[in-house]
Image (cartoon, coloured by chain):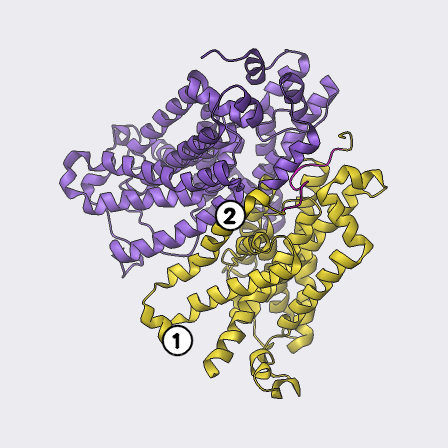
Chain colours: A purple, B yellow
Amino acid sequence: MKKPVFLEKLLKPKDRTFGTVLLNLNLLSALMAIVVGMLFGLIIMLISNPSQALGGFGAIIISPITGGPRVIGQVLYFATPLILTGLGVGFAFKTGLFNIGASGQFTMGGYAAIMIGVYGGNLGGFQWVIGILVATVAGAAWASIPGLLKAYANVHEVISSIMMNYIGMYLVNYLIRKTCYNSLKNESLAVMPSANIPKMGLNHIFPGSFVNGGFIIALIAVAVVYIILQKTTFGYELKAVGYNKDAAKYAGINEKKSIVYSMMISGALCGLGGALIYLAGTGKQYTVVDILANEGFNGIVVALLGLSHPIGVALGALFIGYITVGGFNMQLYDFVPEIINIITATIIYSAACALIFKGLFHKIFKKKSAAIDLNGHPIENLRAVSDAPPPPEPQDQQKKGGER
Amino acid sequence: MELLFFLVQKTMLFSIPLLVVALGGMFSERSGIVNIALDGIMIFGAFCSVLFLNFAQHYMSGQVLLLLAILVAGVSGIVISLLHAYASINLNADQVISGTAINLLAPALAIYVARMIQGVQQITFNNTFRIPAVPVLSDIPIIGPMFFKQAYITTYVGFAILAAAVVILYKTRFGLRLRACGEHPQAADSVGINVYKMRYAGVMISGFLGGLGGLIFVVPTSTEFNSTVSGYGFLALAVMIFGNWKPLPILGAALFFGVMKTIAAAYSGIPWLLDLNIDSAFFKMTPYVATMIVLAFTSKKSQAPRAEGIPYDKGQR
């Protein structure tokens, strides 16, 4: 099927003025967010304990890289689930959805993997493969609910997936207690050794660390998502719906199906992340507490840092893994590791504000409005490019408001 | 009968924080700013005010201390909500992302500061705030034991806030202007209303009520604060949507969610519920599931403020 010309224009920057070049230096804004976050962390540390602050801050920045292969392996291990949740959230961003439900999908995937890991003994060598696949399906299924509600009932995905986070968490806590519960430790039963993802040689490169084949699977996922988004018609259509639902519909794309597929792929990636953490063979079990999984929210950080681009997401996850390990080492200097969470929260906040800097560049170079969407695409520009039925603004606003 | 009184008292403890925080969210959203930061605001408000209680309880106690703590909670809620307001109003930031950032920042900051100050993350306080029986009123049959025995002053504060919210939103010039900014900011601007100011006001009210809600969630249910409000901010968000962004329906939704929470917490003491043999997890889930169902059926004709979540741009038509 040949796409109409305006859609072509919609997905590609039309002109390459200096402003657009700067705009494409999105990296700059992500780096800026990181710098602001780190500085804020440093300031907090300086206020709370001036004499140790520089040493502690140095530990965050330097210690993982100087700690030798074991510590680098730990960085990769902590980055692994974040790559997946980041990819999931980023994929949704790319297709115009905010999947704040990554946490719930991650938990559902984790539960599915644990079940296969505990009871799938007769699957033999395929046990971990099946575990991963089932987790992926579980994540996709959980995400399909907000997807369907968004597509067919006009329910805003942010609200519905927040609800799904809590429903999923309570449901998994219940299911763990009923099906695979270690009541002594208040956690899930240990998975069988055959369910653990093989090390795939990484234990030789990074001896003594937790890193395992999950990291390689995560990298494969990065490649797959990259191909889907950049090289396939399917991904192209999903992105088109994200940019402008009405224009995509006009071009003959089934926008409702696309929304559901986007959410499901996003959820599948998050579910896979859950499998990679509970089948990692590190003895980490699911603890039954009424707290949402933090990996899902860190996925949002990672996706924002990586500007939703698969490779950027991988780098963003490595960064978060890096400062997490650095944060452990920082405790030698009498600091509390929560400083890392303060830094990541500040990074998200500045990333949200960093969109304005890109908007400012745009304002300066193109004298257009600073209004931009999640991916940093100036909204005004999109309207200008799509010369086929541009939705008049007041109507557009009604739509947006009506989604809740 | 004793059981019923107990359940009503307990429901109040769960419902009032939800009511107050959801009303806060309502003010923000009616002004056009999506506020999913309610959870973070609650945590921050509770943290600052419990810290205040921890220090000030050596010098005073009882209702005066609680009222002062309420003020501290509200003011600290305003402080952190200003972060959200600045990002979403001045910087045109994505309001959901900015809210998410605050939700992550508040607990991290609370844990960090608590542990840096006193070594452990739990901050304790003495609960000297329970009113065994309100004079005169507690002698009224039925209503007396339900609302005026074993009560907290926070319950009455909550209802006072509800009354004030109704009046402010529907009977004052300020309320009308606030609602206009959430529905059609351009139109509001064209008649001389400062949209930015109104939206700041909306977010700051939500900060005040959110912080206050954090404190009145913690005080009756615990004697320590552990850097969490158990997702109550998100539940309050659900209450607000369930209540259709209107004060009185929000009261109804808060009571419904409060009853569910009460059942989840106390069902083992209620014989006929225990016989049903339903796991408490399902009672905990019910508010969220109910919200999903309601959303599924009502979102096509949702009454959400129309301009909600859209940064105001003076240049637009």
* Above or below for B31 versus B271: above
Q: Which mark is residue B269?
A: 1
The answer to whether any part of residue A70 appears in the image is yes
Q: Nearer the viewer, residue A400 or B89?
A: A400
Measured as percent of width and height from the top left, residue A164 is found at 44, 47
Answer few, some or many: residues within 10 Å of disc 1's Cα (few below 14, many 20 plus, some between 14 and 19).
few
Residue drawn at x 39%, y 56% is A289
Secondary structure category for the residue under label 1: helix
Are discs 1 and 2 both within one chain?
yes
Q: Is residue A111 left or right of residue A265?
A: left
The answer to whether any part of residue A306 appears in the image is no
Q: Quadrant of the C terminus of chain B?
A: top right
Q: Which mark is residue B297?
A: 2
Instruction: Please state the total of marks drawn on the protein image.
Output: 2
Magenta-highlighted residues: B304-313
Gap in angstroms between the C-alphas marked 1 and 2: 35 Å
Q: Is residue B55 left or right of residue A322?
A: right
Q: Amino acid at mark 1?
A: Gly
Measured as percent of width and height from the top left, residue B102 is found at 59, 46
Measured as percent of width and height from the top left, residue B41 is found at 61, 53
